[in-house]
Each structure stands twice: as C-alpha cells, then as structure tokens.
Amino acid sequence: MQRLEEMLSFLRNRKTKIVTDSKEEELSDLNKLSEYIDNATIFGSSITDSKSTPSISIEFTDHNLVELAQDTVNLVLEILQEYSVTHSVYVVWTGKWFEVRIHEEAIPPSFIEKYGSRSGFLITEFILRKYRNKFVKIANIAKGRIVIKNHCAISGWLIAPLSLVFSKSLYAVYLKPRSFKEFDPSFCTPTNLKHDTEWKSFVENECETLIRDVEKFLERTTIDHQDYTEIRSVAQSIPSIVGRFEVMALLQAARYYVLTGDLEKAKSFGLNRAIFYAWAKYYGSRRIIRGYTRPSTGTPTSTSSSSQAQPPLKDYVELSPRGWFMIGDQEQTPQDFDSQVKTKFEAVVPFEIVWNKAVRYVKRFPPEVLRDPNKFFKYVYEPVRDRFLELLSMPTTTMSVEPRTKTQHRHDGRRVEEARKPFKSLTDFLSSRKE
C-alpha cells in the first residue's frame, strides 16, 4: 500500500494543509508532499474544483464510547441506504473521531451547477436536520460525550487517507461500508492497519433520490453557511419509559436471533417470553397459567401437549397455525413487538442502536447459556435488566452492573407485590399489554 499515492488521489484538485507541532500552513506544491507525510497531519479542502464532499463527523470525548459512535456511523449508513446511496459512501476512522462522507462525483451535476461549492454542506445539513431527533437521542444517551456535526461547516478541511493523526501514532483510514462491517478500533494503528483502497469508487448520480428530497427541503428552508448543525446532549437524564418488560423482550429476541438468524420470528419469541415472565411475576411462580407452570428450578415450561420445543432453544412454546409464537390463545407477531416494545425504546434512543447493542451483548455468552432459559435469565437478563439503557454507552465487552444488595431485592419484592393486579384471566392480562 503506497501512502503517498493514496494521499495524492484524494488531494488532487483540493487545497492542501499540513499541521505539525510547530506550524500550520497550506502546501501549494504537491510534489513536496513526501517531505511531510511522516511528520505532519495532512488535510485536503472539502471543496474540489466546483464540487464539495458531504461529510458528517461523529466525535467523542471518551474512548469507551467508540462502540456507540460506531453504531452512530451505522445509523448514518442505513439512512443513506434508504436513499440507495451505498457504493459512493466511505467512512473515515482516525482513532479520535469518525466521518461519514459521500463521494462528490455521485452528486448530480444539476445540483452542483445550482449550488456549487455549497452542495456538500447543504446535503450534510439536510441529513442532520431531517434525522435530528435520532441523533439527539444518541447524544443524550452519551450524556454529552458524543457530538455529531456538519463537518463541511466546522473547518472545511478533511483529513487525507493514511495521514498521521495528531497523536503521530495513529493513521486516518478510509473504509467502504462492506469493510466497516468488520470494524475494529485497532484498524488505525500501525500493527493492524486496515485501509480500503476502494474508498474512491462511486456511481454517477447515485445521490439522485437523495437530492430530490434535499431540493424540496431547500425550497422551504433558507440555510446560511454559519447556520450549521452541531448536535450535543440537551437532556439531564434518560427517560424511564423503558422497563423490565421491554428489556426482557429485547434480549429474548436477540437470544433467538443469535441462535437462529430469523429476525421476524425472533421478535415474536421475544414478546412471547416477556409476556410469560410478566404474567408469572404478577401471580407468582406457583401460579399455573393455562397449562404453563414454573417448576422449582425457576425454568418456565409447558405441560400443554400442543406446545412444541423450539430447537436449538430448550423453551417449550406454543406455535400458532401461521408459525408465530403464542400464549393464551393469542399469537405474538413481529408487528406486536414493534408496537409494544420497539416504540418504547424509540422514544429514548434509535432502535437500531439498541438492537445492535443487544445482539452484541447476547453474543458474548456461550450457546449452552443461550439455549437454557434458566441460565439465560440468570446470567444474561438479570444483571442488566434495570440499567440496560444506561449501559448503552459502555463497551459490550465490559458491560456489567454492580451486584444487587439485599435491601434492593427486598424493595423489588415489595414493588412486585404492589404491581400485581386482579386480572381474571391471561386474556385480560394480554389485553392490558396492548392498552
């Protein structure tokens, strides 16, 4: 891999700036670039000829937030994918921040002719403003330690590929979405350097659908270059709208998905198991629930002859004629999961962030723990059930909580007793979940 060639492929037709410990200056002669690549940070202007590069930056102040910042990058990539912008996108990782850029050559010429060097800034601004609520929720979860910006407006300079970063021990690497799927924070280090030379590939006019929405947005909005978006946390605390029921449904769905790869059926399973445990909590472990009982081991099983084992899980759960999981003669569909669980999480943080975190967390545990409902409850669900949202900003590998005290357990016991309601039947209970 030739660092100089990669840099030049980016810097041609751009202004170039070098930054060292002692000086910051523009470099007018790219023939002299080789003199600086090993002792300076190299930047190119966001404007090339009459075009400009759309760029969203995700910055963080705590290295523990790399994973949440990574999920934010994935969210941006999913947004762009909705507009069919996939081949002309690349991610920049510096070890200190991320950037998501769109290749300027993928922007329709008519838009560039109309807006010129402001085109990249306006496209970036549209994305950040349209999806602002999602990004604000991420910033709130990070408690102000993640900032999402219109990078075109902040400095107008974009770090060059394989440039040294300010620390002088890291490199700026460019990754296409397919290579970003295997992302590891060490990709920018000399010992594990991973750079995708295909970053420069693009598809002409790939941004056409996106641009149509941008132009509609600009018809009703006037944007000054100083009026750019920079999203920081505005909340002091995380709303308490998500409870144990939603966390149980989420983690059970992730459990089923990790073991089977079936997302739609995983949603059905997750909601089904959450309802089962919630019903058992209301009426106690000795209550028989229409053929379902909880034995002394605490493992929920079914005595119904129509129940079916769902390999590779050891749970026994009824299936409806349509193939969804069911309890109390009511099936739990993926749409039910979305309306009863996903919407609760969405009120606090983008569900894409929550789901990716849950899947990574569940994958930490061996299959024998995930197959067994008893072990899953004890080792996977119970340690995080009361603080899952707070733990979103932690690395999955260190995700844990403090052991619960006897006082906390007694308090929880009183809270369960107070929460129990005199439902006449499981059908009444299921109906209450949908209110």
Image (cartoon, rainbow, N blue to C red):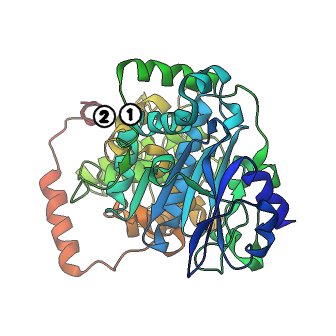
Q: Is residue 386 left or right of residue 184?
A: left
| Image spot of residue 101 (x, y percent) | 61, 46
Q: Can residue 341 be seen here?
A: no
For badge 2, the amino acid type reads Leu
Q: Is residue 257 left or right of residue 39?
A: left
The residue pinned by badge 2 equals: 430
Residue at 59% across, 28% down = 83
For badge 1, the amino acid type reads Gly
Q: Mark 2: which secondary structure?
A: helix
Furthest toward the right, the residue is: 1
On screen, 145 above or below 208?
Answer: below
Q: Residues within 10 Å of mark 2 (few under 14, many from 20)?
A: some
| Image spot of residue 342 (x, y percent) | 40, 40
* Along the line of sight, the residue nearer the viewer: 397 or 184: 184
Q: Is residue 158 left or right of residue 126?
A: right
Residue at 48% across, 64% down = 374
- Numbered disc in front, either 2 or 1: 2
Q: Mark 1: which secondary structure?
A: loop
Task: State yes or no: discs 2 and 1 in contact (Cβ < 8 Å).
Answer: yes
Name the mark on residue 328: 1
Q: Quadrant of residue 218?
A: top left
Name the mark on residue 18: none
Q: Is residue 19 left or right of residue 174?
A: left
| Image spot of residue 125 (x, y percent) | 45, 38
Q: Which image quarter is the C terminus in?
A: top left
Q: CA distance from mark 2 to mark 1?
A: 8 Å
Furthest toward the front, the residue is: 28
